[in-house]
Image (cartoon, rainbow, N blue to C red):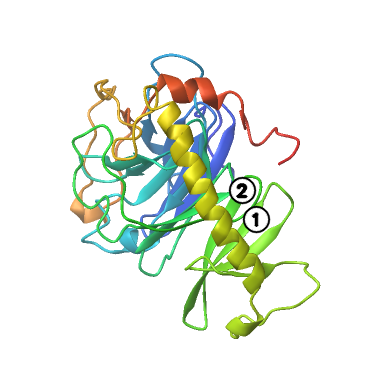
Amino acid sequence: MSWKSSGVHKSDIRAVCQCAALGVVATASHDGEVIIWRLETQGPVLHLQRPTQAGPLTPVDSLLFLQHRAGNRELRNRGVLVSSQAGCLCFWSVTGQTHTYGQFYVPEQPGERVLSLSSDQLKNTTLVTGETTGWLEIWDICHYALDIQHKPVGERPPLLQRWKAHERALVSVEVLEVAERSFVLTASADGSAGLWTKDGDHVGSFGQEKMWNISEPATYQRTTRNTLKADTKKMAESDEKGLSRVKSKVPGPASRGQTSQEECCSEASPSSLAENDHDRPQQHTYLCEDPCQSAAWCHERGRLFDDICHNKHC
């Protein structure tokens, strides 16, 4: 069976994610467009895209369906799809009349990007993000993106943990549930892969000489973990100094990513999903949103990871 996607995306596809509960697939391209496809018909049913006012188009780096929400009839019309674009996370509903349910800028530094996303899919209580700087964050999303957000960019959800996991970009993060405990698996553009507890303790790196036992914390790389925590404190202080020097150009933590520009209207009004078809998207619609844009970020973005797929180090 061939996939009828030829000619729909106008640029290279960079990310794909599937949601069995809704019977859809999401694809995202280099020009920032996200398309929702119906598995049954292989056709597009929804287009989502942030409009670009000026400068180059910003690619979508990652997609993630929140599977628990999608499988819950009370939550599936809320923010169930997360996309990462130019460091900004957008929470989308792929059913119902309103599609934007939350958006915020992740990195502490301007011009960075979020290349990887993951969540505890049994509950969707946390969201893990991996940056181009090697930093990893764990966010509390228990109550995030469940109500309609009227502002272009809202406040961040509570930040539970943040640490420097690798020296270079985090190209993949994955939440693991092992022996009733949560861990985070990471892979980096520096060629290393590691395992961490949800509290930021370093279990170990794959390929290291000394083996660890995931059920015995005494075998974890304690020295490495302590060093990373010390480095985190130093880097946080450095970040604060750097941000103070450019605060006239970059929004502060409480309003990072906010913009005064109006949200872009859709080419065609979004359509809600009929209840008698299990809350799946029905009509081919277009929607544009403008969650966060900053001239300072656009200027800085060009210097790093312009296209992670073509970067020779990645």
* Quarter of the rendering containing residue 106: top left
Identified at 37% across, 33% down, the residue is: 48
Identified at 58% across, 23% down, the residue is: 302
Mark closer to the chain start, 2 or 1: 2
Q: Mark 2 falls on what kind of element?
A: strand
Amino acid under label 2?
Val
Can you say whether 197 is above or below 232 in the image? below
Task: Answer whether labels 2 and 1 touch (C-beta < 8 Å).
Answer: yes
Which disc number belongs to residue 160? none
* Quarter of the rendering containing residue 206: bottom right
Q: Nearer the viewer, residue 190 or 13?
A: 190
Residue 62 pos. (x, y %): 51, 44
Can you say whether 278 is above or below 101 in the image? below
In which quadrant is the C terminus drawn? top right
Whether residue 207 can be seen here: yes
Q: Nearer the viewer, residue 49 or 6?
A: 49
Q: How packed is label 2: few (under 14 Cα within 10 Å), some, or many (20 or more)?
A: many
Left or right? Give the position of 163 relative to 227.
left
Q: How packed is label 1: few (under 14 Cα within 10 Å), some, or many (20 or more)?
A: many
Residue 270 pos. (x, y %): 24, 33
Identified at 42% across, 65% down, the residue is: 121
Label 2: which residue?
Answer: 171
